[in-house]
Amino acid sequence: MSLVNELLYLLFPNRCALCGNKSTFFLCENCLSSLNVNFNRCIKCSSPIPSREGLCSICLKEKRYFLKGFSLFNYKEDKVAKIIELIKFYGKFGLIDFLNHFRKEIKNIDFWNDIDYLIPVPMHPHSLRKRGFNQAVLIAKKISEFTNKPICFDCITKTKLTKSQVGLSLQERKANLKEAFKVLSLKKDTKTVAIIDDVFTTGSTVNEIAKLLNKHSVQSYFFTLSSTPQITN
Ligand SMILES: [Zn+2]
Ligand SMILES: [Zn+2]
């Protein structure tokens, strides 16, 4: 959003947060319908790949502990990255309702029937206090609304205060997240869950949680709002 649009939005909240045009919702119809959910996805982790069908470079060489995942958007789309930024760093929670526009696409994902619980990726209590909310929880609440699947808020906790993953290599990301999470209280009947997060980059976070859950005989799928084309070093 340009500075002018940002000011317009502050002065006239009934304008689209992305383009500044008049809108009754945070995002106008034009911006909503320009968000693309059709791109070539890795058949395992849903990352954007160049070919129509296949595995991404990371799924080809790394052990994945999750069964499969789905990302709704390609993070490389400027508007998607902007929406996530507005929610995460500008506290515009209401924007998460833009997912109502994609209810059908989300409901159509093939693994919801297998799921017992949705597990939002937890934040470390220190980071949570700083931000005041967990964006993964906001997403999980929307998914729960669409699928009627319950959320497990206290299944997993983050016990290690990790540094930001931005700019780290695949190996550094893995090391950063190693043993960062602990199982707190898994419900007895839990066999399969869906891990929920905002951005999937190399998948180190989701993979680390899936690995931990595997040790407790729980299988994982995942849903993320967006996925980036992958870094492989
Ligand atoms: Zn707009
Ligand atoms: Zn993949």
Image (cartoon, rainbow, N blue to C red):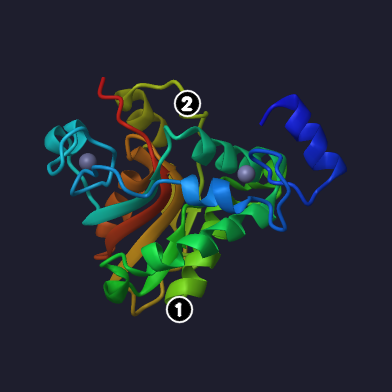
What residue did someone put label 2 on?
166
Quadrant for the C terminus in the image: top left
Query: Residue 170 appears at what percent x and percent y?
Result: 31, 26
Which image quadrant is residue 49 in?
top left
Q: Is residue 108 visible?
A: yes
Quadrant for the N terminus in the image: top right
What residue did someone put label 1 on?
148
Along the viewing direction, whichever of 141 and 131 lies nearer the viewer: 141
Q: Are marks 1 and 2 in contact (CB under 8 Å)?
A: no
Neighbourhood count class around disc 2 (C-alpha, 10 Å): few under 14, some 14–19, many 20 upward: few
Along the viewing direction, whichever of 5 and 30 lies nearer the viewer: 30
Along the viewing direction, whichever of 171 and 40 lies nearer the viewer: 40
Q: What's the amino acid at mark 2? A: Val
Neighbourhood count class around disc 1 (C-alpha, 10 Å): few under 14, some 14–19, many 20 upward: few
Q: What's the amino acid at mark 1? A: Asn
Residue in the picture at 74% in, 33% down: 5
Query: Residue 30 appears at what percent x and percent y?
Result: 56, 48
Secondary structure beneath dot 1 equals loop
Secondary structure beneath dot 2 equals loop
Query: Residue 121 appears at what percent x and percent y?
Result: 47, 52
- Is 175 displayed left or right of 7 in the figure? left
- Please tell me which of labels 1 and 2 falls first in the chain: 1
